[in-house]
Amino acid sequence: MNYSLVQGILGRLLIGYSLTMLVPLILAFFSKESSQWALLLSLVITACIGLLMYRFRESTDGKMGIRESFVIVAGAWFLTSFLGALPFWISGSVPTYIDALFESVSGLTTTGSSVINDVEILPSSILLWRSITHWLGGMGIIVLFIILLPKTGFGAVHLFNAEVPGPLSKRTMPRIRDTAITLWRIYTFFTLVLIGLLLAAGLDLFDAVNHAFSTVSAGGFSTKNTSIMHYNNLAVESIIIVFVIIAGGNYRLYLEAWTKKSLKPFRNTEFITYLIIIIVSTLLIMGGLWLTHDKTPDYALRHALFQVVSMVTGTGFVSTDYDLWPAITKLILFVLMFIGGCAGSTTGGMKIARIMLLAKHTWSMLTRGLHPQAVSSIKLDGKPINAAAVNMVSLFFFLYVGIFAIATILIAGTGLEPMDAMSSVAASLGNVGPGFGIVGPTTTFASITLFGKSVLILCMLLGRLELFTLLILLRPEFWKTKSRW
């Protein structure tokens, strides 16, 4: 393990991360908010730690291998989470550092869960910092870092694979920095277009910027206590629905469409399945609201579509109090929390591509049970999937369910009702945001104990880094000097 290389890279990353605090700091300065001192101190602390790490590294020689990339990605997310919590804590926006860390991790992992009961009394600079953590975490801190460090070399491939869900096709890997730049250009383009549309729909500049950051990242933080419900604006809801659907798509498709100037990439099986899931779920919930909850068809369509899109992408925006809906509609939303969006998107959850592969693998095993001599291969978009990839998907599913069960037991042990515990863990592990019951759309996670919040913080990080990046660090042989990684 080249610890010096890891230390130097993480130091440079923290220096860059500290500069992002300049944006809310400038806003606080011109608005004459007391939070300017909290932001300034947070910036200085983060920058100093980064400078010390970079300055006192032993050497930058040596290549970046797989082990170094895993440590860098995990270290980057932990360090930015811990230091990103400083503005919330020092400004007094939350009572404890654990609460501040929860808010920071929720922002960077684009979960959108909050422990702040009244966000509308917070300084505008702190609200902006919350949204910035969403925007940075959406496309990925490491992906941005690859752009800023042109000398990362082939190690960038390992970094990219360790952080980005659903890696891009192999042919893009040799030009990984160019790919990262293009991805951020597309991401920024979506953000700017969304800001303009939200302004046209009636939001002021501050709210438009914050909600654009939260939407393109599939995050869900809002400047209002009741989220999008506050505006009761059909135009705003419609615009957000479109861009949240975009956020749930595979950015590889957007990259190909952008470079080839063609819509053919969207004939993708996973993307089409993603849209079908949204349509079918919306119709089912719409029917449930219309027939059993005495809601008008326009209300049912409007809010069913919004909440389905919000849940399946893990955005967590709220257009109405869905916790008052019939049990069957809430069950559908609960299932959507596990599914997630497409691989390579800014969303959480298991991802549709994995679920499709798992379903195909299960069907293949059943077929072999009937016809032992049959030879069949699992394909996706007409391309055969090797056995190793299928095994990884099966392992991911097993780990996801196992972690969900263990975390639910731990949270239930803090005094929460079983359904509330399941909801809070599903919302955290799937990077969704609000859940049901005590952590529903009109409440926060503030009432959960500090131990419970700590468990959920770990769940959010595990969900964002797709389990393996963190769990692989727990293997003792990973840290052995002679280990072949």
Image (cartoon, grey):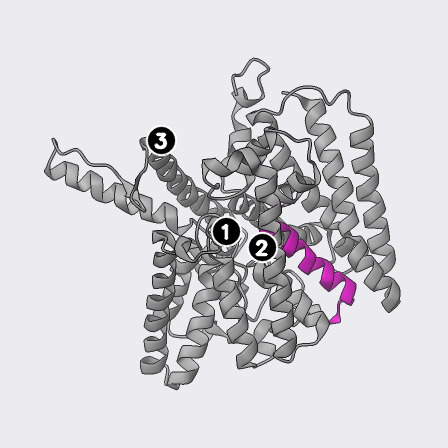
> What residue does disc 2 label?
186
- Disc 3 vs disc 1: which is toward the camera? 1
Of residue 85 and residue 48, the one placed in the foreground of this image is 48
Q: Which region shows up in magenta?
A: 120-140
Determine the residue positioned at 57% across, 45% down: 461
Q: Is residue 124 above or below residue 303?
A: above
> Looking at the picture, which amino acid does disc 1 mark?
Tyr
> What residue does disc 1 label?
251
- Disc 2 vs disc 3: which is toward the camera? 2
Element class at badge 3? helix
Tally of numbered tags: 3
Res 220 seen here = no
Residue 324 lies in the magenta stretch:
no
**Cβ atoms at labels 1 and 2 below 8 Å apart:** yes
> What residue does disc 3 label?
388
Residue 224 quadrant? bottom right
The answer to which of marks 1 and 2 sits earlier in the sequence is 2
Q: Position of residue 75 (x, y in %)?
A: 65, 36
Label 1: how many residues lie within 10 Å, few (<14), some (14-19) or many (20+)?
many
Of residue 54 and residue 458, the one placed in the foreground of this image is 54
Of residue 173 and residue 280, the one placed in the foreground of this image is 173
Res 37 seen here = yes
The answer to which of marks 2 and 3 sits earlier in the sequence is 2
Can you tell which mark lies on residue 238?
none
Q: Is residue 242 above or below residue 105?
A: below
Looking at the image, residue 32 sits to the left or right of residue 267; the answer is: right
Q: Is residue 259 above or below residue 392?
A: below
Label 3: how many residues lie within 10 Å, few (<14), some (14-19) or many (20+)?
few
Residue 131 quadrant? bottom right
Label 2: how many residues lie within 10 Å, few (<14), some (14-19) or many (20+)?
some
